[in-house]
Amino acid sequence: MNIAAEHPAQAAQQGLRTAKLLIDGEFVESKSAEWRDIVNPATQEVIGRVPFATVDEVNAAVAAAHKAFQTWRTTPLGVRMRLMLKFQDLVRQNMKRVAATLTAEQGKTLPDAEGDIFRGLEVVEHACSISTLQQGEFAENVAGGVDTYTLRQPIGVCAGITPFNFPAMIPLWMFPMAIVCGNTFVLKPSEQDPLSTMELVELAVQAGIPPGVLNVVHGGKQVVDAICTHPDIKAISFVGSTAVGTHVYNLGSQHGKRVQSMMGAKNHAVVLPDANKEQTLNALAGAGFGAAGQRCMATSVVVLVGASKDWLPDLVERARGLTVNGGTEPNTDVGPVVSRSAKERILGLIEKGVDEGATLSLDGRGVAVAGYEKGNFIGPTIFSGVTTDMSIYQTEIFGPVICVLEAATLDDAIALVNRNPMGNGVGLFTQSGAAARKFQSEIDIGQVGINIPIPVPVPSFSFTGSRGSKLGDLGPYGKQVVQFYTQTKTVTARWFDDATVNDGVNTTISLR
């Protein structure tokens, strides 16, 4: 919803928060004429408003980052590391407050909101190891009296574009690692739920990040395109939908930038009959319906192999027992989806699944939540009898919907998963080490879980989604992201002393 240019004053009169811009160390009110309501998905209450920044404001943010880079790039490693130590401490102290804001604007349960923050906090903690992560290499005497070594140097102004489903974790994947590597940063949070992101940004400023090193702008396509085309931005990190991620990758690359785009997914879980039944059913229900299915790593497809097809009624009953409610209510399992438009889209896909002949084994439409009658709720939904040509299989639903397929053998299941164009994550549930080893070797997916449904690695490893789920060579955290946010400079040096014999001019290309 857009409103008039005089919005900030109106918002203040109504007691609403506005999402500020951060430019050169100052939190400022945008001069934009275009604003959007920030809506609580459980109640439809307007809790704040966010501006769509002007091109001039984006340019000012980039200019501040470009200026700050000239001094920040030479800031000692120890200073950068201690700043991140302070930042992680502040995030930890304020986790419950930020989680409450996150739940209010995004809808996920309070425990899940804290988990959102914690998984981002792990990356901040990893950033505190920058003194070893950013080390180069050295080889002595590669030729007569010649040494070669590499330096990992920051690349300049970097930018991040983050999604609505993880307004804490994904920004914390991005700006801490970029900044601790010696770069400056321009962040564009999701326009749907920017308030919790801004609370984390405020903590970063409180931790001592200098003016211009971190900047924030809000907006939609115009701001995204301005970031992708600005000549002073050297690298862009993106997490979000496939359509937008492909656009960002193509436009940014055409303008000479490094780009990493983490995009859509269709994550499968393959279940063998020898798997631990109770643990597997719990894992599938949690991974499929947690966060109302609004995770790029959610388990949205279950492949029941052989006799495990008989587990379908048990999976339905496990899902039926989950509690749908407002995210602030205790013991809630499934909160609302983020917006009315998201709910309408998901309901449309459920209807299409029915029309295309899938069996609706559990129907989550029409769920009523007392006290939250206006909320964007959809209950856990399970389709069985799904085939790979159906829209519900081919489309990332991004809601609390699981599609169940069957396969006769593990080989058939592997072939089925490998035919899907997406490659974010996959899980195998089994008690057989031989089956697990075969699966992890033959499956063509970037992140594999063995009896783990959401195989997102800890930050000391890299996020390695693949194929249609990723554009760019390097992941958004771990060792790979240090490569992404730095450029390698190789130095080859020879030093002469007074005793060196002059052996004449050497016109060859070899070093001896």
Image: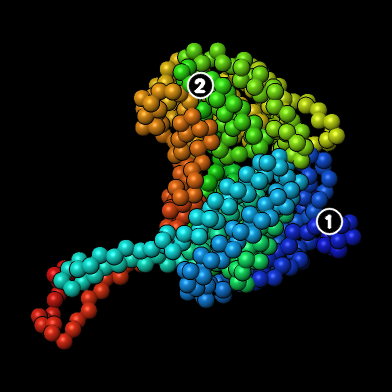
Residue assigned mark 2: 276
Please state if 112 lies on the left or on the right of 31 as rendered: left
Query: Tell me, what colour scheme is on the image?
Result: rainbow
54 versus 114 height, above or below: below
**Rendering coords of residue 251 (x, y %):** 53, 55
Return the residue at label 1.
16
User: Residue at (25%, 65%) from the top-left corner?
Assistant: 139
Q: Which one is closest to the eye, mark 2 or mark 1?
A: 2
Q: Along the line of sight, which residue is nearer the eye, 117 or 27?
A: 117
Q: Position of residue 247 (x, y in %)?
A: 56, 50
Residue at x 60% of width, y 48% of height: 118
Mark 2 is surrounded, within 10 Å at the Cα level, by few (under 14), some (14 to 19) or many (20 or more) other residues, namely some
Q: In terms of sequence position, does the residue under pointer 2 or pointer 1 come before the other?
A: 1
Cα distance, mark 2 to mark 1?
50 Å
Whole-percent x and y of residue 315?
61, 20
Q: Is residue 493 left or right of residue 5?
A: left
